[in-house]
Image: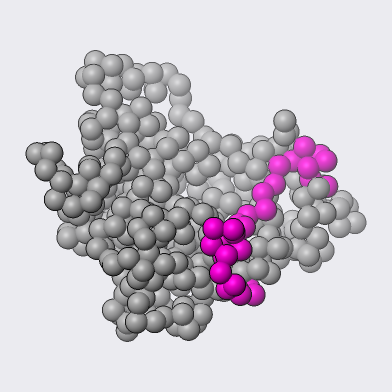
Amino acid sequence: MYKIPVCRPSLPDFDQYVEGLKRIWKSKYLSNFAYYANKYEELGKKYLGVKYVRVLGNADVGLILGLSILDLKPGEEIILPSFTFNSTANAIRWNHLKPVFADIDKDSWCIDPKDIEKKITNKTKVILATHVFGNPCRVKELRKICNKHGLTLMFDSAHGYGSLYQGKKVGTLGDIEVFSFSGTKVVTSAEGGLMTTNKKELYDKMTMARNYGFIDNYNSVRGGANGKISELNALLGCLALPKNENELVKRQKIAQKYREELADVGDIGFQKIEKEDKSTFKDFGITTNLRDELAAKLEGKKIQTKKYFRPIHLMDWYRDGTKLPVTEEIANKCLCLPIFNEMMIEDLNTVIKTIKNFYGKN
């Protein structure tokens, strides 16, 4: 049992949740895009300022269906980073498409537009980029590439609910974006996701795809799946989502404290966040050549950390001989430290002190 976990979900007032449950029990609607599911969508749409939003059971479903509505042919190629969670690549394989891994930028840890250009072929159809730990990608450069080659720009925005790119909300930047609200996220519905787009055609296709391929007549007119969110999860999300900005303020303060206190400690490095951008700091990563030793030291003090991400191109299911030197370097040096909305200053100071002691700084 860890004294300080690497993450911990923030939950709403229990009595508020119970009051919502009473409404659900009275209505007898547990799913099928009922009251709280619709409210969930409305909250997301208003907060993000995007034209179209669809709520989903989870982000994996969103990524899989998001690719499916592009109506691509088997074997066509999707360029993505390897420094991302497994879901990003799995969604490609589920659609019988080919993942093509590009390297990341050494500073931002997000996909490198220059390497993308090297990977484009006549089979390339989509760039699927990840806002790593909530740090926005270089959107303008990615959009320029997509416009040049006629590609769809899609974002795995699982970490990015509340992130800003040059003052614009993540969720308004791609042709399709998918958010996650699982238990490790800044705000959570335990399981849940949102797909956003500014294109009516994609919105209409997703509306069918998340509901077995039909609207209301049980006649599937396209491929689909069960993308429904339960009212129990949607209720939790409706209580959590309005708190997102307040929770982000807390995380910004924690991240700033880490950066200030560890700036001159050992060989520790940080992910670069551009001045005009804002990260959610869904995770707070550092880099160090002594990653494993530092992790063991913190573990000994019952402080949990996470070696994150494991590069997908080196996983058994995806290994094909691809070499991504920057991805492999960052992955071998990256350690995510504890960060969560309700983290006490005493716990934060304990983590910082333990790290300083490890490097011989008191």
Q: Is residue 300 left or right of residue 185?
A: right
Name which residue lies at 46% across and 25% down.
Answer: 13
Image quadrant in which you'd find residue 12: top left
Relative vertical location of residue 242 with respect to residue 292 in this rendering, above or below: above
Image quadrant in which you'd find residue 143: bottom left
Image quadrant occupied by the N terminus: top right
Q: Position of residue 81 (x, y in %)?
A: 51, 67
Judge whether residue 137 can be spotted in this image: no
Judge whether residue 75 can be spotted in this image: yes
Name which residue lies at 81% across and 39% down.
Answer: 301
As drawn, the residue found furthest toward the left would be 217
Q: Position of residue 196 (x, y in %)?
A: 30, 55
Q: Is residue 203 left or right of residue 110?
A: left
User: What colouring does the structure picture have?
Assistant: one colour
Instruction: Return the residue nearer the eye: 155 or 119.
Output: 119
Relative vertical location of residue 308 with respect to residue 106 in this rendering, above or below: above
| Span colored in magenta | 297-326
Q: Is residue 12 left or right of residue 341?
A: left
- Which is the main secondary structure of the residues drawn in magenta? loop
Q: Position of residue 69 (x, y in %)?
A: 25, 58
Name which residue lies at 82% across and 63% down.
Answer: 266
Count of numbered circles in the view: 0
Instruction: Return the residue nearer the eye: 256 or 176.
Output: 176
Q: Position of residue 195 (x, y in %)?
A: 32, 52
Tell whether position 318 is magenta: yes
Name which residue lies at 29% across and 57% down.
Answer: 68
Tell whether position 172 is magenta: no
Image quadrant in which you'd find residue 107: bottom right
Relative vertical location of residue 115 with respect to residue 229 in this rendering, above or below: below
